[in-house]
Amino acid sequence: MPERNRTPTDLLLTTVDTALRTLFATPRASRPCPTLAQEVTVLSAAEKAEAGALMRVNHVGEVCAQALYTAQALATRNPTLRRHFHQASAEETDHLAWTRQRLDELGSRPSLLNPLWYAGAFGLGMLAGRLGDRVSLGFVVETEKQVEAHLQEHMQRLPASDHASRAIVAQMKDDEARHAREAQDAGALGMPAPVRSLMRTAARVMTTVAHRI
């Protein structure tokens, strides 16, 4: 349905549908899962456990990304910007599917707190959206920059022989950097230092807890 023809009820139903699909359905990617065809992943039990914990954190990040973009799409009144958020959300769905698939392969599980993470991220997305489109885009830029740095750290922490997880994380990192550039080009407003610091603190809490639960 064209954006201009969507009613508030349509937008609300889409928002609820996205939440239910993110939290309770098996995500489906539109792109093939990244692989390193020439590399074979062989992991010890301890390496599997650590890789699983790290990929659980990455999966939580994608749950939050769905919530953020969905909330920002709901909050904006700009149809062009709403399409931008929906497109970014679709690409993040690929990440959600890839990380969930890798969790299954590692014999690990998603975070038990995913509904809580989703709700918190959705609230932040709505707040950013209500403060205006440029603030909302600025929130995207800062979020994606922090996610990119976090993924780079995981590239260093993942077992050296876990080529399967590394391929996924590398592609995610490239996509997040592009999302930040696109939001910046769309007119993002820079976030004040206290806001950036608060976002980093919240991200550290989330990653620490999700690594275990």
Image: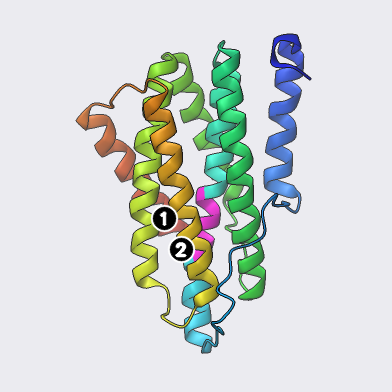
Q: Is residue 27 visible?
A: yes
Amino acid carrying label 2: it is His
Q: Which residue is mark 2?
A: 211
Q: Image quadrant of residue 177?
A: top left
Q: Compared with residue 113, is residue 43 higher up or lower down, i.e. above or below?
A: below
**Residue 54: x, y in percent?**
47, 66
Q: Compared with residue 5, is residue 138 higher up or lower down, i.e. above or below?
A: below
| Residue sitting at the far left | 193
Q: Quadrant of the N terminus?
A: top right
Residue at 49 percent of width and 54 percent of height:
172
**Residue 195: x, y in percent?**
28, 30
Q: Which residue is mark 1?
A: 207
Q: Secondary structure at mark 2?
A: helix
Q: Compared with residue 157, is residue 70 higher up or lower down, i.e. above or below?
A: above
Q: Is residue 213 visible?
A: no
Is residue 79 on the magenta stretch? no
Please state the extent of the stretch shown in magenta in the rendering: 55-61
